[in-house]
Amino acid sequence: MSAVPLEVAAVVTAPVSPLPLGAAEAAPDALRLDGITMNISGLIALSEVSFGVPRGRIVSLIGPNGAGKTTAFNVISGYMRPTRGQVSLFGEQVTAWAPERIAQKGLVRTFQRTSVFNACSVMDNVLTALHLQGSAGVAGILWRSRRARAEEEALRAKAAGIIDFVKLSARADEPAVSLSYGEQRLLGVGIAMAARPQLLLLDEPAAGLNPSESDAFKELIRAIRDAGTTILLVEHDMHVVMSISDHIVVLNHGQVIATGAPHEIQHDAEVIRAYLGSGMKRAKK
Amino acid sequence: MIKLSARGAVFPWRGLACALLLASLPLWCRDRYILSVATSIGIFVIAAISLNLLLGYTGQLSLGHAAFFGIGAYTSALLSLGFDLDLKFAKLVVAPKPVWIAFIGAVIVSGISGWLIGKLAFRVRGAYFVVVTISFAQVSRLVALNWVDLTEGPMALNSIPPLSLWLPGVGVMPLVTKAAKYWVVLVFGIISYLAVARLVRSRIGRALIALRENESLARSVGISVTHYLVIASIASAAIAGTAGALYAHNVQIVDPDVFLFVYTVTMVIMVIVGGKGTLAGPVVGGILFGAFPEVLRDYARPEVQWIIYGVAMIVILVFLPEGIVPALSRLRFWRARTAVVSATGPTLAGKNA
Amino acid sequence: MDQFLQHLANAAALSGTYALLGIGLTLVFGIMRVVNFTHGEFYALGAYSAYGLVVLLKLDFFTSLVLAAIIGFAFGSVVEYVLLRRRKLSDIDGVMLIMIGMMIVMQNTEQLIWGGVAKLVPSPFSQEPLVWGAVSIAPIRVFVVCAALVLLGGFYLLIERTRLGTAMRATFQDRDAAAMMGVNVSAIYTLTFALGASLASVAGALLAPIFVVNPTMGDLASLKAFAIVILGGLGNLVGAALGGIALAIVEEFGAGYISTDYRDALGFLVILLVLLVRPQGLFAAKERIG
């Protein structure tokens, strides 16, 4: 599966169409962090973190456990307010906006744990995520106006398309809580895509997946990027990171210690030291 | 498990059959006492349906619901009786309004109080929210009790006019027979049920359920928390207010006791035991706990009845936390499922790669 | 001015009683995060125990205080063991509703046993008020303030200075970490709840000679206790005491200068205002809400 079906692309692509080659460098970054510092009860989780995510690219945010990656995600997506610094989305300041407002602007994130609506069926999960693409009001719903019914049908069709795209059609009517772990992950991505992100934040999407599931996920992520969505992901699986990222940002102890293309990062001494700690020295002995 | 997927427009045969059966009650049961019990059960069911919207579907433990019921009752009563208020700087005189105007006024005022509480109470969450809602009901009760000028306090508002119906050829007919009152309540019961059913199966309903299931995830797809909590609060309050207005015109007396915590608890028990988050739950719970006092009347004193209800609630919460209706539907679903599996053999789970 | 002083004196006396109500609930609501609707019922239990012990069994008041505390403790342990152990305390709603169910059972049992007529417990002190210039206070109220101070002090020491108190605080900050350190978490939970219940029970017994004893006294007591705990900030013993004083002042002066009818409503209005303006309570340090 390498191409995104047309009808799905229509659903998930943001109104901004993919930029022609060369134009990406001139346009503002999809996401820009400037001097983000996050002080949580005395602990400095992030310190002067600055980086950009160019449009239409896949950028990975990596670092050892506790480096501050999820905190960065929380700040970007509005679940935490940074102590200092600014976040801008396509050139617009979104620092300290409420999460739902940021989502309405085109930034959608996934979650590591509890990534689905447990009691709802797969279909209802995706339908819920299509919230912003509907507009039926209370009156229309109560009177079952033609417009409301038509909108509901259209949303169902879109949801079916997305469920197909993430290969969960066989499970469409099952409650999300009964899905396997890998299936819930796929549903989580489906939910995120339904919200029509221009910028998609994926929080450890490949965690706990076996190699063939990871490969499928890589294809999925590439397909999403090809449809025009910018992607920022946090990931531990280095194979996944190195193979799909256009660009990598490395965090350690709340600070950016390196940025660059995958092959640069692989040989960066700072990065190696951060991951291996003093183990490197001991290993050499 | 809550199955929400409604595939297209399937004609609700079972619903229609139930409605017709209920409507036929006064035709084969002439006992006025039973009809009047059925009418109050109906009013309680409507109140339970409204609480279920807020408690079951949106997941907000609002324990002040009697406030909306009472506000609806008092508003309808006051508007249909007319009142005059001696404020320090002016005298406010309101003439008695036609009973249906008063009724609509009650629904509107309850809805507004739902908006007010929604806006204010949802700024705090969890246990604090519960305390705010309880306090609101208590304050309402104390106001009703002490603002004697307006509400007659403990002396109650009485001689409230009954609802009336305009029929061509007959003119305006006051609905005073037990059967007529029962039918009015039944009609509103069906309307409330359908309104809530349509709401929860729609985009708005999905947003409410999403907030209950996983608020962070809901926000991440653009669902605004306060906006939808307030919508739920307004709808829930308006329906409860409808029940209150029906109560006022049914028993034709309203006193501050409508605000008592015990009535809120009654509604909560109905919703919890019946099955929160299901459409049939509050109906089942309402019928059960509306009927119990009558059934047990000759066998047990009120205190003993309440002890039984309290124990029943605890037992359900510990052993059957989802309530009766989901437990029953799981039983059927499980039976249907095992039947399918044995008929067609085990199915292969599709590979997702 | 005289009136002001009298109101102040009344508020002082009332604040002792309210502080007592508050600390018991703080233990359970504040530390265990259990919305304990039965708190008022343990208060009523204490009051009825006092009535039974003093009037029916002819024991003296001070013995009945001690016995009321023990009864509250025992009953509280049973309630916690039977009802709360099974539930994960993270399911706040379920726990709340179970507590409501228990409240209904307790209240109606009391009504069944004792009937709805209010009961009176005679005061062990003389009825002569102590007079001090323009201010007069009944001796029993002075005793209540002293008893409240003693109990407050005792519990402060228990929580802050003993190993048991440290174990309790540790358990509620991080249950798993405490368990790993060898704390018997289940026992701590039971103990905390029982202590809270016992405090409420003593408060009820202490206040029985001042207010009448009836089966619904628990409702108002519960709600005022919640008001006090919220005013003072969650999990904060000192805050509960200060909250009790604050509520007493608001009620006393409000009733005196605004209207006596709405006396009880004032407490609730205060809750509403505080929660909307400063949800973490007037005296708490930074605290996450909800």
Image (spheres, rainbow, N blue to C red):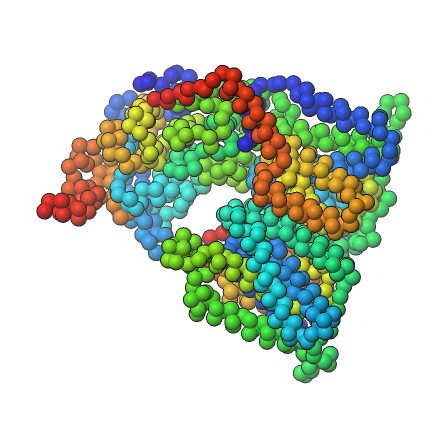
Q: How many marks?
A: 0
Q: Residue drawn 33% across and 34% down?
A: A208
Quadrant where the image shows the N terminus of chain A: top left
Image quadrant in which you'd find residue A161: top left
Image quadrant in which you'd find residue B52: top right
Along the line of sight, which residue is nearer the eye, B146 or A270? A270
Along the line of sight, which residue is nearer the eye, A259 or B101? A259
Looking at the image, residue C188 sits to the left or right of residue B18; the answer is left
Looking at the image, residue C219 sits to the left or right of residue C233; the answer is right
Along the line of sight, which residue is nearer the eye, B207 or B230? B207
Residue B324 placement (x, y as % from top left): 63, 35
Q: Relative to A157, say whether C23 is above or below.
A: below
The answer to whether any part of residue B285 appears in the image is: yes
Q: Relative to B299, say whether A173 is above or below.
A: above
Image quadrant in which you'd find residue B76: top right
Which residue is situated farthest in the left direction here? Answer: A285
Residue A106 placement (x, y as % from top left): 41, 31
Residue B315 placement (x, y as % from top left): 62, 44
Along the line of sight, which residue is nearer the eye, C251 or C71? C71
Residue A42 placement (x, y as % from top left): 34, 56
Q: Residue drawn 13% across and 44% down?
A: A283
Q: Residue drawn 63% across and 60% down?
A: C42
Which residue is situated farthest in the front direction here? Answer: B342
Q: Residue drawn 32% across and 26% down?
A: A213
